[in-house]
């Protein structure tokens, strides 16, 4: 187990992912909330930070239980922190040190650099520079512009590097992390999907015993994997509820329900589409739509779970990025949209919460799902927002608009699949615009709806680029939509990136 201390860098989660790729379990904690019991940790990594060690607001971790007592790797801010407060010197750099650089010197015979090529490319991102090393330090590497790109402290197992090994552009970054964690710190590489499944199933059996558990399935990857894992542990004591809010993709409710039943899950499908659409009638404001759907979902789910007797636990598919306590750098970040609703259902349900995936990243959830034998097609599904098509129908929602959008979306998604493009896209969908435009069909003038298609590449939804779908594909899809979907006479393609746009239009 490895402890990563976060100083607010956007790259901290990436360090954790790289460490996990080495089959080593790790956890992220804010620098000012270091766990009091460190006995289960075999090594510590200090991450980067947007702060300067010279600033008054610089993060000051208390490393007294760590330094010299266990293997420590300090990255970027961490490296500067060790230098600045242990007898070295850090000053503003006079050359720009951002982007790719190459190691121009590597000290010979260092385990840390085993397997790392001469001139290895590394990724720099800092505005301060280490001008003098801390006491007892030895230089291990330099680049053209950065003399102290890496150093170690004699008499301790402490290493420090100015560049970011976790970033893809640091070609041998993963090798260096492996050298440090496996060869130097001797951390065992035993965190595999199989091991996770075995351990989690045992833990769930122990924790849940004969208790009944209820879980809301959404058709998405996380809740599905959580359900299969729980099913493996407690079998038919897991009661799954799958709610149709009337805003799912075309035929999705029935298809996914059938799929779940085929997987041996004890699942009840609740078709509450009319109730949702009834409550949404006349609402145009995006946030009010989200809140209405959230409220109705809780009501439906609550009614259903009250039909079950003696349920003690509520299971959720929460994953690690929702759990990590982040270091606030610019104060509480402004609410952009009211999703990211960690915390789930209200207290009055009085159920204990069980979250078997809370320590996993999304890609790990997929790998665990594969280990559990879940259909790859289900695991590869694009993300789909909880409020479903409601936030892709701009303006108010009517059953007719839902029908139009389901048909358009279906042509688009099926098209992506048949052209072999679906897996190359992170998320795709269609948006029904609140405008009519003039068209001509045969001899007739039409005045019908405009739809926008959106397809993006992303890794986590935080940033995204629009996908350069082939023109031939767009032409075919546009034709199919206009010919097959009554009420639509114009198709446009969204070519905005996030930021400054968002993935959804509402
Ligand atoms: P945005 O539009 O913020 O979307 O760029 C980022 C990701 O979040 C999804 N999204 C939601 N998911 N409830 C959800 O469960 C929501 O209200 C919601 N709004 C956006 C969006 O589909 C994309 O994957």
Image (cartoon, grey):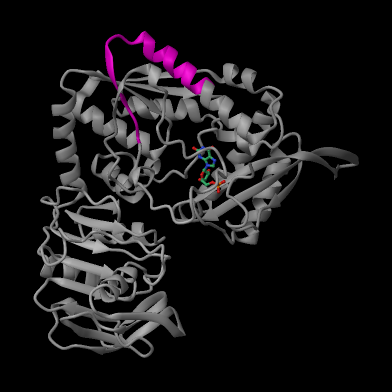
Q: Which percent across, then down, holds residue 35?
A: 21, 48
The verdict on residue 113 being magenta is no
Q: Nearer the viewer, residue 123 or 505?
A: 123
Q: Residue at x 65, y 29 (%)?
A: 403
Q: Is residue 157 above or below residue 45?
A: below
**Quadrant that contains the C terminus:** top right
The region drawn magenta spans 296-317
In the image, residue 301 lies in the stretch drawn in magenta: yes
Can residue 234 be seen from the camera position used here? yes
Q: How many marks?
A: 0
Q: Viewer-proximal residue, 133 or 280?
A: 133
Query: Which is more toward the observer, 435 or 136?
Result: 136
Q: Splitting the image into 4 quarters, where does residue 343 fall?
A: top left
Q: Nearer the viewer, residue 467 or 351?
A: 351
- What residue is at 61 percent from the left and 50 percent from the top? 454
Asked whether, in this view, residue 206 is left or right of residue 425, the answer is left
- Rendered location of residue 73, percent (x, y): 22, 68
Coordinates of residue 121 in the picture (x, y in percent)? 34, 81
Residue 356: image x %, image y %?
26, 36
| Direction from residue 202 to residue 173 in the image, left or right | right
Can residue 20 be seen?
A: no
Q: Is residue 198 above or below residue 350?
A: below
Up the image or down, 131 lies above or below 428; here it is below
Report the residue at 35% width, 35% height from top: 317
Q: Who's the residue at 30% across and 75% down the image?
A: 84
């Amino acid at each position: 187990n490895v402890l990563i201390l976060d100083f607010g860098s956007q790259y901290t989660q990436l360090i954790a992912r790289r460490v996990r790729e080495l089959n080593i379990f790790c956890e992220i904690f804010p620098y000012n909330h270091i766990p009091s019991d460190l006995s289960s940790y075999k090594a510590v990594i200090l991450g980067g930070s947007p702060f300067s060690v010279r600033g008054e607001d610089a993060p000051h971790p208390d490393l007294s239980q760590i330094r010299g007592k266990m293997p420590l790797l300090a990255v970027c801010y961490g490296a500067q922190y060790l230098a600045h407060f242990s007898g070295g010197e850090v000053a503003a750099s006079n050359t720009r040190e951002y982007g790719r650089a190459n190691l121009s010197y590597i000290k010979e015979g260092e385990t840390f650099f085993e397997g790392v090529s001469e001139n290895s490319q590394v990724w720099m991102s800092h505005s301060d520079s280490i001008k003098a090393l801390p006491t007892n330090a030895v230089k291990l590497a330099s680049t053209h512009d950065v003399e102290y790109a890496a150093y170690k402290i004699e008499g301790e197992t402490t290493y420090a590097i100015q560049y970011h090994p976790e970033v893809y552009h640091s070609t041998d970054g993963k090798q260096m992390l492996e050298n440090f964690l496996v060869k130097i710190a001797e951390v065992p590489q035993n965190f595999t999907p199989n091991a996770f499944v075995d351990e989690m199933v045992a833990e769930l059996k122990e924790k849940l015993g004969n208790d009944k558990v209820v879980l809301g399935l959404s058709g998405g990857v996380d809740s599905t994997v959580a359900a299969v894992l729980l099913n493996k542990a407690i079998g038919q004591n897991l009661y799954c509820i799958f709610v149709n809010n009337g805003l799912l993709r075309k035929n999705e409710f029935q298809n996914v329900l059938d799929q779940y039943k085929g997987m041996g899950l004890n699942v009840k499908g609740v078709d509450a589409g009319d109730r949702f659409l009834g409550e949404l009638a006349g609402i145009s404001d995006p946030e009010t739509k989200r809140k209405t759907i959230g409220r109705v979902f809780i009501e439906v789910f609550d009614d259903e779970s009250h039909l079950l007797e003696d349920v003690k636990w509520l299971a959720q598919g929460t994953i690690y990025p929702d759990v990590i306590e982040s270091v606030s750098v610019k104060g509480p970040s402004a609410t952009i949209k009211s999703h990211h609703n960690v915390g789930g259902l209200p207290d009055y349900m009085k159920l204990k919460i069980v979250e078997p995936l809370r320590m996993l990243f999304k890609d790990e959830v997929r790998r665990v799902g594969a280990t559990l034998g879940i259909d790859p097609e289900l695991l590869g599904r694009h993300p789909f927002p909880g409020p479903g098509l409601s936030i892709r129908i701009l303006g108010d929602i009517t059953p007719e608009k839902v029908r139009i959008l389901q048909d358009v979306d279906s042509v688009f998604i099926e098209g992506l699949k048949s052209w072999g493009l679906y897996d190359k896209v992170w998320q795709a969908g269609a948006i029904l615009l609140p405008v009519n435009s003039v068209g001509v069909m045969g001899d007739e003038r039409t005045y019908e709806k405009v739809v926008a298609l959106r397809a993006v590449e992303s890794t986590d939804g935080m940033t995204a680029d629009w996908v350069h779908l082939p023109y031939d594909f767009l032409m075919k899809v546009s034709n199919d939509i206009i010919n097959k979907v009554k009420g639509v006479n114009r198709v446009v393609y969204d070519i905005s990136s996030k930021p400054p746009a968002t993935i959804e239009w509402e």
